[in-house]
Image (cartoon, rainbow, N blue to C red):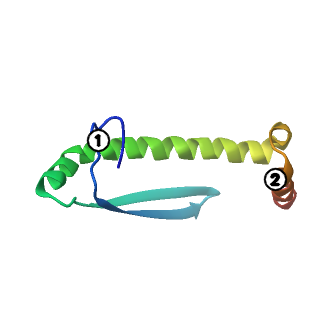
Amino acid sequence: MHNWHIPLSLKGKALFLIKHTYEHEKVSVTLSIYGEGGDTVVTRLLLKAVSPLLTYYINRRVTRNLADFEKIIDDIIHRPAKIRPRISGQFLMEFERLVKTSG
């Protein structure tokens, strides 16, 4: 982990589980993060101390990324002409195939 909010690098292991469900034309995503303490007692204590802060920042980052993803998908579906001038080559070919398939 390296974040400018935390002045030192802490090492530990984490397991990220992503679960999604589709209901009523909406996708719901649950992200669970399970951390394992660091190599030393001091590292484990520091990780435990900053855990609420990490949870807050990870939640905020994931929430913002999903909101951006929603905007991108909305533009692809409803405003493909807005996207076409911004891409070229293989990306444009794949985009056209995606729009043709979904439309």
| Amino acid carrying mark 2 in the image | Phe
**Among the two numbered marks 1 and 2 on one chain, the one whose residue lies closer to the N terminus:** 1
Query: For this view, does 58 lie left or right of residue 97?
Result: left
Name the mark on residue 95.
2
Q: Quadrant of the C terminus?
A: bottom right
Badge count: 2
Question: In the image, which disc is placed on residue 81?
Answer: none
Q: Residue at x 80, y 52 (%)?
A: 91
Residue 43 place in picture, x, y as percent: 18, 52
Residue topped by disc 1: 53
Q: Name the residue: 18% across, 47% down.
A: 46
Q: Position of residue 31 (x, y in %)?
A: 43, 57
Q: Is residue 88 above or below residue 97?
A: above
- The amino acid marked with disc number 1 is Leu
Residue in the image at 84% along x and 61% along y? 101
Residue 46 left/right relative to 92: left
Q: Residue furthest left?
A: 41
Q: Quadrant of residue 70?
A: top right
Return the x and y of residue 34 as percentages of the image width and height. Answer: 31, 61
